[in-house]
Amino acid sequence: MNTRLPSLVPLLVFAACHKTAPPPQAPPTVEVAQALQFDIQIRRQWVATLNGFVNADIRPQVEGYVRKQTYRDGAYVQKGDVLFLIDPRNYKAALDNATSTLAHNVAALEKARLDVKRDRELIAGQFIPQQQFDNDLAAEREAEANVGSARAALAQAELNHGWTQVTSPLSGIAGIAQMQVGSLVSTSAVMTTVSQVDPIKADFNISELEYLKSAKGTQWAEPAHGGEPVLELILEDDSTYPHGGNVVAINRQVDPRTGTIAVQGSFPNPGNLLRPGQYGKIGATVERRKGALLVPVRALNELQGAYQVGVVGGDGRVDVRTVQLGEQVANELIVERGLQAGEKVIVEGFARVRPGMLVSARPAVLGSMDSAAPGVAGEGR
């Protein structure tokens, strides 16, 4: 055994020296997309509630029992159309009484004027005392006042009698009646509501920051006087309303509780498709950017509040950079700083690489929703 050990040592040394080295590992494969510059429109959307341009609560101006409803619930009515009839009998009686009272006072006034005329002749010949003449003058003035009061009472009686016909103050859609035939109504009761719906209003709220950007930029949120429509309405079924709208009013103050300011838009509504109370989304182009640098959202990686991208250089090595982001346009983000146009960013495989690592890059397959086409407005965040 002792003589064999020295002879085995050279053999082991020879085998160790001639051991085959392992093959080098292939660089990891990543998918990349090119950072491109486009002229884009930055859009925003807000939840909106539709409302009548004018909403009139129909209240009677006299009390009484409803005798008849003269319109069809939900129908379009014209300004001045009679909607309800209130029992007019007591108001007709009051009108007749006021007419009679006026006639009586007019007759009394005529008699007082005759007395004064006769007294002027008699007092000239000193056939009557001065006191009688003074009394008749006072009676004439009192009769004149009574006639004036009776005329006012007659005018009020005529108004009350006329108000038994409850009419619409505007043209629009009348709602379902809240008071039925036979109901006793007071002047505080809402019998129905008539809404002017062409045009129709859309109420929505924008943030204080969005308001400031509008005021300093495109001023899209300012009331428009003519010009091209700037608002788009998306309905509940995700269809886009075919008629564009404009801003007609912006509130005087920012709500300190929410940090938003109320805006009212107006849309034409031929055919009355839109109704008060509907919900929708208001879309608007809030900014236009020329030469904006865009990368897919998938290329961004958040780390402790900062955003990083992996850039594959011409030598195939990875450079990890921190970037400053702007607005989101569809499924792409605007990069304000940290990246140049034409550079390739990693959209798949970022977790497997480290700075300076050699990688095998292949173009990523981006769908229609992964990239915003040049000049096409995308939906804002």
Image (cartoon, rainbow, N blue to C red):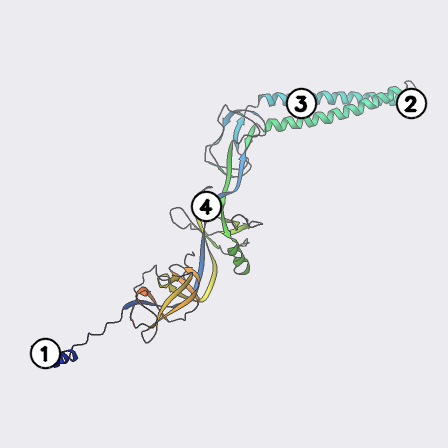
Marks 1/2: CA–CA distance? 175 Å
Q: Quadrant of the C terminus?
A: bottom left
Q: Position of residue 81 (x, y in %)?
A: 53, 34
Distance from label 3 to label 4 (Cα)?
Answer: 48 Å
Residue found farthest to the right: 126
Earlier sequence position, callout 1 versus callout 3: 1
The disc label shown at residue 124, or none: 2
Q: Nearer the viewer, mark 3 or mark 4?
A: 4
Q: Which quarter of the figure is the N terminus placed in?
A: bottom left
Q: 201 or 290: nearer the eye?
A: 290
Amino acid under disc 2: Ala
Q: Residue under circle 1?
A: 5
- Residue 122, compared with residue 284, is above or below; it is above
The one of 166 and 354 positioned closer to us in this rendering: 354
First in residue order: circle 2 vs circle 4: 2
**Are the residues flagged by discs 2 and 4 in contact, CB closer than 8 Å?**
no
